[in-house]
Amino acid sequence: MEIVACPKCQNTKVVKSGIIKERQRYLCKSCTYYFTVNKVGKKIDDYYVTKALQLYLEGLSYREIERIIGVSHVSISNWVKEFKIKKPPHPNYHPSYKIFKHAELVEYLKNKDQLSGAGMIITELGDKFMLIKWERFKD
């Protein structure tokens, strides 16, 4: 059993005192302070949140981002709402993306034909790289 300490006086003489919003409430016997403990949950690294939001702004859908990063599309949707991200209007194009290892990316970028006539960004994705590419002025 974990020992709960009072956040006010750090005393461990605490007793359970009901449940508030599905969280256990405690009472410190020393200073009579009521408190609840933080909800334990899975926290996703900020790196993946940032990458997901970058990809969303580049025009990828929630499910595409889910397949790339491995994070639920619902979580991605919640982050977009939480940070009030507005996707810029891109009605005339949908970007394509490829994931490369370092050597593959270098080989891909050697071919000048691959680079001309398109806008692109390259972003790090763990130990790989993602190239997002879209055609300019597409009708």
Image (cartoon, grey):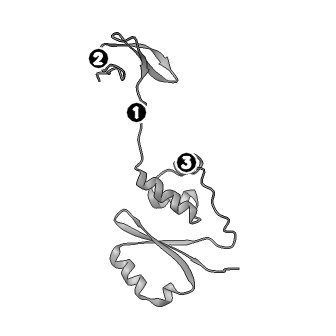
Q: CA distance from mark 3 to mark 1?
A: 19 Å
- Of circles 3 and 1, the one toward us is 1
Instruction: Say whether residue 118 is left or right of residue 14.
Output: right
Q: Position of residue 76 (x, y in %)?
A: 53, 51
Q: Amino acid at mark 2?
A: Thr
Residue 41, by quadrant, is: top left
Q: Position of residue 131 (x, y in %)?
A: 47, 73
Query: What residue would you read off at disc 1?
Result: 40
Sequence-first disc among 2 and 1: 2
Instruction: Say whether residue 9 is left or right of residue 69.
Output: left
Q: Position of residue 134 (x, y in %)?
A: 57, 76
Query: What residue would you read off at disc 3?
Result: 74
Q: Is residue 25 above or below residue 88?
A: above
In-front residue for pair 116/71 = 116
* Residue visible at 50% across and 24% down in the picture: 22
- Of circles 2 and 1, the one toward us is 2
Q: Circle 2: is it few (<14), some (14-19), or many (20+) Cα within 10 Å?
A: some
Sequence-first disc among 3 and 1: 1
